[in-house]
Amino acid sequence: MQPVADTIPMPHLEKTIVAEGHLIDSGLMRQIFDVIISDGGRFEMLKFDIGRTNDEYTKAALRVTCDDPVVMNTILLKLSSLGCQIDIDRKVILKPAPSDGVVPPDFYSTTNYATEVRLDGHWVSVEQIRMDGVIVVDQAGRTAPVVKKLRSVLKGDQIVCGLTGVRVLPDFVERDRVDFGFMSGEVSTERKVRLAVDRVADIIRDKDKRVVCVSGPVAVHTGGSTDLAKLIEHGYIHALLAGNALAVHDIEANLYGTSLGIDLSTGSPVEMGHRNHLRAINEVRRAGSIRELVAEGTLTSGVMHAVIEFDIPFCLAGSLRDDGPLPETVVDMNEAQDIYAQMLNGADVVLMLSTMLHSIAVGNMLPARVLTVCVDINPAVVTKLKDRGSHQTIGIVTDVGLFLHLLANQLLRA
Amino acid sequence: MQPVADTIPMPHLEKTIVAEGHLIDSGLMRQIFDVIISDGGRFEMLKFDIGRTNDEYTKAALRVTCDDPVVMNTILLKLSSLGCQIDIDRKVILKPAPSDGVVPPDFYSTTNYATEVRLDGHWVSVEQIRMDGVIVVDQAGRTAPVVKKLRSVLKGDQIVCGLTGVRVLPDFVERDRVDFGFMSGEVSTERKVRLAVDRVADIIRDKDKRVVCVSGPVAVHTGGSTDLAKLIEHGYIHALLAGNALAVHDIEANLYGTSLGIDLSTGSPVEMGHRNHLRAINEVRRAGSIRELVAEGTLTSGVMHAVIEFDIPFCLAGSLRDDGPLPETVVDMNEAQDIYAQMLNGADVVLMLSTMLHSIAVGNMLPARVLTVCVDINPAVVTKLKDRGSHQTIGIVTDVGLFLHLLANQLLRA
Amino acid sequence: MQPVADTIPMPHLEKTIVAEGHLIDSGLMRQIFDVIISDGGRFEMLKFDIGRTNDEYTKAALRVTCDDPVVMNTILLKLSSLGCQIDIDRKVILKPAPSDGVVPPDFYSTTNYATEVRLDGHWVSVEQIRMDGVIVVDQAGRTAPVVKKLRSVLKGDQIVCGLTGVRVLPDFVERDRVDFGFMSGEVSTERKVRLAVDRVADIIRDKDKRVVCVSGPVAVHTGGSTDLAKLIEHGYIHALLAGNALAVHDIEANLYGTSLGIDLSTGSPVEMGHRNHLRAINEVRRAGSIRELVAEGTLTSGVMHAVIEFDIPFCLAGSLRDDGPLPETVVDMNEAQDIYAQMLNGADVVLMLSTMLHSIAVGNMLPARVLTVCVDINPAVVTKLKDRGSHQTIGIVTDVGLFLHLLANQLLRA
Amino acid sequence: MQPVADTIPMPHLEKTIVAEGHLIDSGLMRQIFDVIISDGGRFEMLKFDIGRTNDEYTKAALRVTCDDPVVMNTILLKLSSLGCQIDIDRKVILKPAPSDGVVPPDFYSTTNYATEVRLDGHWVSVEQIRMDGVIVVDQAGRTAPVVKKLRSVLKGDQIVCGLTGVRVLPDFVERDRVDFGFMSGEVSTERKVRLAVDRVADIIRDKDKRVVCVSGPVAVHTGGSTDLAKLIEHGYIHALLAGNALAVHDIEANLYGTSLGIDLSTGSPVEMGHRNHLRAINEVRRAGSIRELVAEGTLTSGVMHAVIEFDIPFCLAGSLRDDGPLPETVVDMNEAQDIYAQMLNGADVVLMLSTMLHSIAVGNMLPARVLTVCVDINPAVVTKLKDRGSHQTIGIVTDVGLFLHLLANQLLRA
């Protein structure tokens, strides 16, 4: 199944490799040993220097041996993809895309970790890192190698194939004990939520990080939209990604006082209240857009009002279950993915609030280094999001309305 | 908030109403009493004839009185919308849509129950019943009143407004005790699943009902796609609605033996297996479409192969989290909703297999009378789907792979 | 299977019955109709007077007829157990218990609703109402009929058998709309929790109701024990029912700052912290009891300190998974059930905090009229508790630590 | 907080340690590095020999250095408890228990891994290994060191204190790739359950392993008791641990055809069926015991019948929520724990079927080496059980009724 080995030109039976990084905490050392042994190689540890501080890397040198040259090459390629430096100058294998949106069968599929390819004897960084893409190289060298989604590939694009000449720089779990324990611990409903809120507040308080918020409509149903609007108005959120439903129910709440027909001030169903979200959609359509509803003075509060008044970029992505949709909603999923990806560009922190669909979509677009804060009352959702790729996830199992209430209190009190 | 009462031309202080149907089992009698009392009216029971058999209806006649004519009219309108017959010939109120996709503010919002409007002294059935739509009437009478989604309304369409002249014919819970207990009972993880499977098998065995299957990719991950393919091949499924992911993983499973990189014959992760779903997408793109992949002989088994070989209509709807997508995937959500609605037309039974997003979308499009079978391992999903509208739901909390295995065994054994 | 009909002495083919209460809101009218029709009888509605206010009852009179005298009797007995008054003076059937802890096979099994038995031509209230017990009658009439658990029955006790001469007075759902909607609505994670907290605060603020708290250790893990202690110290809680684990982790938290080894001030695991709960147990054992640990000045804060200092009755029930247990823990389950039942005597409100085992146990012991407030982050637990018997349940799906924090804030701020 | 360092007699500033085992796969090497670095030490890798086969161990030698002798000792103690061999002959520290059930404050708290203590210059195995106990040493050497629960400690027992002279032999994750992936993977609802069933069948097919089954009543509710009875009758289960409820509902099912009042052949509630579990209890009480109910020929099928007829040891442990309880139910939790522990003695495989309470209790009693198979429809329960201690857990998220059906089919077909 692996069309890898046959792409390697010449055999090695013994090779010295070097690995560098937070090899222990990250589990990378274990993976290196694993690859060698499970594929049938042997190794001897030549050097092992442990970093003294959080900033220092550990450096290891190993002599790898194997009797079968084909296996040896497979091992070396895998070690290379784990970030090991191998003293071989073997450049990346490029093959042209046979047509638009199609790549050669042995294409290299990206992870969400920082990645480099070997070009002209140098390791060159790949840009626009995200999961499940392919790497396109400009052979003329005018632009950097870049990750593209399959559908964006053009006929003739030079696609990186096989594992040769590709290396991944794993995202290292930091060694700071307090953070480590808190952040990477198991997802649990049995933790003190206020501590997690304090920590998130600390991270975003200085506004020196780009914070993108991805939110489901539950933020409105649970009474959190007032607090989310406050966070936006005070400059803590730099882009809002959501679905049609968040905007619909936010506008419903601010025009009619209900969310999905439930009165937000009493918690009781309002008679004929199920009609209110359609009334909200109709009002927006009448005005022409949410922006115009704000401009004409009809919509005067809430999350959508806040992003429009404070000029925060937002994208409402459509879904199959939408009513309406609102005029601003992007109904073409390819286009919505592109806008999402663009708004996530440069994000340092992403708050994922009670929306599995949008959170998974966003997770696929993010480099592993971005810190994500995932809040959901269902522990299975938090676990699922933590399991997808990055170690840089704070999972908080709680009611999103209370989470936003506490977070706004923390950040906005005098 | 209710712009209803002011649309009523003249007061009544006493009125005799008649209600007919399975008034007791359906809870309708209670709702009738409720409306009268809670709004401040009084009533006297004039007649109460109980149906003797499952097929006979109960018939009740009540004299309703109220001192306030405005309140009285509100009560009568609500009773009318509950299906009560009121001896007033008051025709439906129609107002023109002010522009495309916009309706008058007091528009009537549809339920998923059979509905009639009063036109020219007759009750006329509304077609294309679904939740959260508006009713458009052709005043010339050439076509029947029809439910449209907001976005499909055209400027000048005559829109039903207020509650006057609209009545809903509730879907009655059947009185057959065994079925009733089984079908409408609480959602529970503590039931014998095989009984539920037997019942579903009984319902679809004779192939005299139109069965639409809505499925998530978990059907593939849990090893159920072989059985689902068999059900399709033997004619038990008449349309397939799914997302891009079902097709991707079904093709991945049939080309490479994995689903999301997990080997389906061993349950273990395959090395570099996360790449396989992208390989599957690339293969389809290379061939041009799933249909062409089947035609060229590359894809020879599985769910997608079955629907194509046996010419079963299908729709793959896109979502924000899709990879690819596949060429057949409909990425415009408005278009996807329209195709889904069309394929659901005439459905008698809908199997909803482990996909909350698509199931909710489908639930919104269905008349209440359609029997839905909702299978999910998460009881909260089953509860949520049962709570949306119809009493005609069989909720089964189990593994979808085992469900399909048992169902295929029941239906296909000699 | 039903040994009921043969206990009835003489046939009736037509009978007038009277029912009184909130018949509509409670669904009782529907149950009455249901019983008559499903068993094969007929009825004619003679009178139906609706209560005008929340305090007034509805009164209905029906003529019931049936061709089969055995069936007729069964119907009448069932109607009687639904609270209908039947103008027959048929006394309850009593049979002696054949030995200690054993009752006649056709014993009447109690519900948690108020119940009366027909003795000497009068309806007499049964005391100590709880689910799944039997009714013991003192034929000499010196003491009131009382519910006993099977194991408490003594040889020769006169046990109520069959359905004759027993009637149940259903607990009526109140007609107040706001409360009704809020309290009896579906369990949902999509509601504003602060509204529910406000409502609970309103209910217990005046301290005129006996409030019993049943709590799991999650109250400690989630940082809620300080707030729970405050509620106890300010007199809002009148008895505490818990397991060994609540006390262990509460004492661990107050002696060592951890709960299950997690530092409550940082949320991180403490090295060797898993040992702390055993240290806490050992400390209590050294002192002799929790009470002595408080007396000697070692335990100075927390929930257990609060109940001891403020002399609030408490019971720690053992379970199979306990470490220790603590000296105060009652390890005999029969004894623990008896103490729980005694402490629940006279309770008006029971707070059930994140403990399914203890909450179900307590639910079995309570009359239906007691208001229960069930807080759990798992919606399935809340649903399960709501489904057991009483309509008087407020279900709140949230983090119990945040719930206690908000509740204490509501009640204790100036 | 850790009263450990002061128990160490003399400083070391440099020490060579040796570790042996599946150091890589088990993550042990990483823990060793972690301890040294996080506590402020340094190390040099002297030797690192990788095992060639699954049976061979890896052997590592490190020179550890540290400037602070107190810290150095802490490091060495921790490394010792990780199983590292340190060339120091420092015997375990023993202190007498001050009274019955009380130990010195610096007691050593056991894990569920194989453990040795240093006595007279030798490492001696500790018997009766379980979590959260203390180690009692017979200084006369007549009996082996043994783990006792706190409450079983007698005044004067010599209790191991601090970390000196204790070492833990970690349970090694096996290197067999297929098993490893399957067994230690994340808990997921998105897997093919039949593969997991096949694997469990393979493990217990030869009857050469002692298999203990711990089951909740859901096995009966979901229709699995017939299959569980078959497994018992055919010799696949060697002890049954359960609560009162399993036996009650099993007997209810076999006497009356219902489980919690639900007819097991139709899935519908039976009228007055809630009474059936009390009838079952009453029947057992009448006969005197379950055993006598079988002897007199009343109970002729089901799980309890099977264990009695085939003389399989069983224990029914009581709980606070029990009805009855049955005569065989052990209501004293200390006694029930002791019987459970005794029946688990020598177990190779434990099947945990849908019972969180009993499974956690059992998990606490088991050495880590015992393979546990945890089946529950709630993924959170499976995750929680997997997180407690052992890597030797197969977690299966599915309906327990279907699991037992498939398992019996696998094992019992010709």
Image: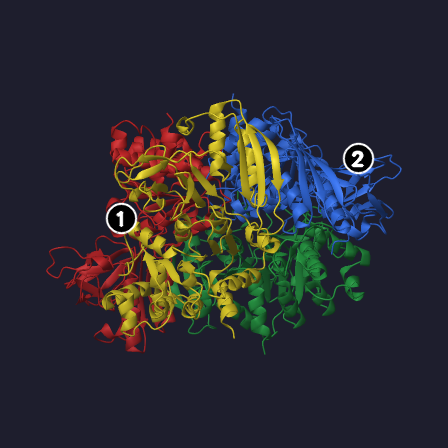
Chain colours: A red, B yellow, C blue, D green
Q: Give the amino acid at mark 2.
A: Val
Given the image, what chain letter belongs to the residue carrying mark 1? Answer: A
Q: Quadrant of residue A387?
A: bottom left
Q: Nearer the viewer, residue D36 or A166?
A: A166
- Label 2 – label 1 distance at C-alpha: 70 Å
Identify the residue position indicated by label 2 in the image: C124
Q: Is residue C54 left or right of residue B378?
A: right
The local secondary structure at tag 2 comes to strand
Picture coordinates of residue D21 (x, y %)?
Answer: 47, 66
Residues tagged 2 and 1 counted as in contact (Cβ below 8 A): no
Which residue is at 23% across, 66% downward? B288
Q: Is residue A352 left or right of residue C268?
A: left
Identify the residue position indicated by label 1 in the image: A336
Q: Nearer the viewer, residue B202 or B222?
A: B202
Picture coordinates of residue D25 (x, y %)?
Answer: 43, 64
Q: Give the amino acid at mark 1.
A: Ala
Picture coordinates of residue D340 (x, y %)?
Answer: 67, 58
Q: Is residue A348 above or below residue D315?
A: above
Q: Nearer the viewer, residue A241 or B346?
A: B346
Q: Is residue D353 visible?
A: yes
Q: Nearer the viewer, residue D368 or B225?
A: B225
Query: As drawn, which residue projects farthest toward the top?
Result: C414
